[in-house]
Amino acid sequence: MKLYDKSSAQKRMNELGTQGVPFIFVVDYDAAHAIVLPESEVDANELLYSFHGKGNAPAVKKREPIAVAWNPIPPSEADYQRSFEVVQNAIAAGSTTLVNLTCKIPIETNLSLRQIFDHADALYRLWIKDTLVCFSPEMFIQIKDGEISSYPMKGTIDATLPNAAERLLNNPKEMAEHADVVELIKQDLRLVADNVRVERYRYIDTLVTNKGSLLETSSEIRGTLPSDYRNRLGDILFSQLPAGSITGFPKSETVKIIAAAEGYERKFYTGVMGRWDGHSLDTGVLIRFIDQEGEQLYFKAGGGITGNSNWQAEYNEVIAKVYVPIR
């Protein structure tokens, strides 16, 4: 599949939007490379997708339970602490207040990327042959009838814990983290939209995984686009990248801190994927993500770090996110 650079991808999206041609796209974390394909040109042998149930993918297979062998090999506590301390030092210096710190985790499993895609249940599913699979619960931006909406997801807890919802909503660290990312998304949307406002704040979704259920909090922020937005879909999308929920606040400085702390290239992980149907745009964040290097599979996962964060709690949250949403 052809990979466009940033300027070529923007131009191609603008052209297809102006023409009213339905297309799909996958953009990497750095917004440096992108796949942009009219839906009529997508080869199902190479790429499958389902965004809110729309796409070229077969229905999720639920005819009979599938046995899942699942053995993540998380980073050592010492390695995670070193990355965590880079972030905490930057926070203490006043360079940032929120950083999304992630890890690259080898996994041993009996499932192929395609099997995971076929059986995983998620709002956004993507499979690229011999490259990656993603089963993301997180919406990025949506555009419909001249309105742009964003849905940052921040805050996770094991749903089986006593009073899990109350503990999540009342946790000071989670409250501060969510407030920062909502403010960041408001700033991003003001680059392209007027009348930016918060429609819903810290609502809870339940995610079912192979290891049990998780609760996660999201918010909905909305704004009004200019009347010619269909001609500038690429410009609008790339103005919002990288996504605020997977970087931090302030974004430009935090991206540098992430590069110093993580020690690996995210590539397509924490990028965005989406579909323009000729009238509306639906996009998701590339989290809950596995990619393939040779014969080895890697799950990439992380979470938001603030000045109130505890490294052990954050380490445990990363491990909790290394799952497949297969019942």
Image (cartoon, rainbow, N blue to C red):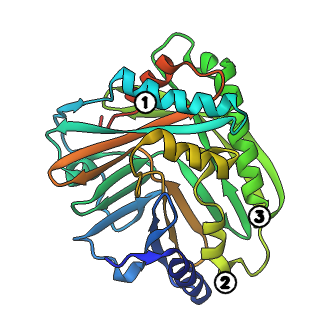
Q: Provide the residue designation for mark 3.
A: 191
Q: Secondary structure at mark 2?
A: helix
Q: Is residue 218 left or right of residue 3?
A: right
**Residue 320 sits in quarter:** top left
Q: Residue at x 28, y 44 (%)?
A: 298
Q: Is residue 87 left or right of residue 191?
A: left
Circle 1 Cα neighbour tier, 10 Å, few/some/many (<14 / 14–19 / ≥20): some
Residue 295 is situated, as x and y percent measured from the top left of the image, at: 14, 51
Q: Provide the residue designation for mark 2.
A: 231
Viewer-closest of 77 and 151: 77
Separation of disc 2 and disc 3 at Cα?
A: 16 Å
- Residue 276 visible in this rendered orientation of the protein: yes
Location of residue 127 with respect to 208 vertically, above or below: below
Number of residue marks? 3
Viewer-closest of 135 and 289: 289
Location of residue 271 with respect to 233 vertically, above or below: above
Residue 318 is situated, as x and y percent measured from the top left of the image, at: 43, 30
Query: Which amino acid type is shown beneath numbered disc 3?
Result: Leu
State yes or no: discs 2 and 1 in contact (Cβ < 8 Å).
Answer: no
Q: Provide the residue designation for mark 1.
A: 318
- Residue 216 visible in this rendered orientation of the protein: no
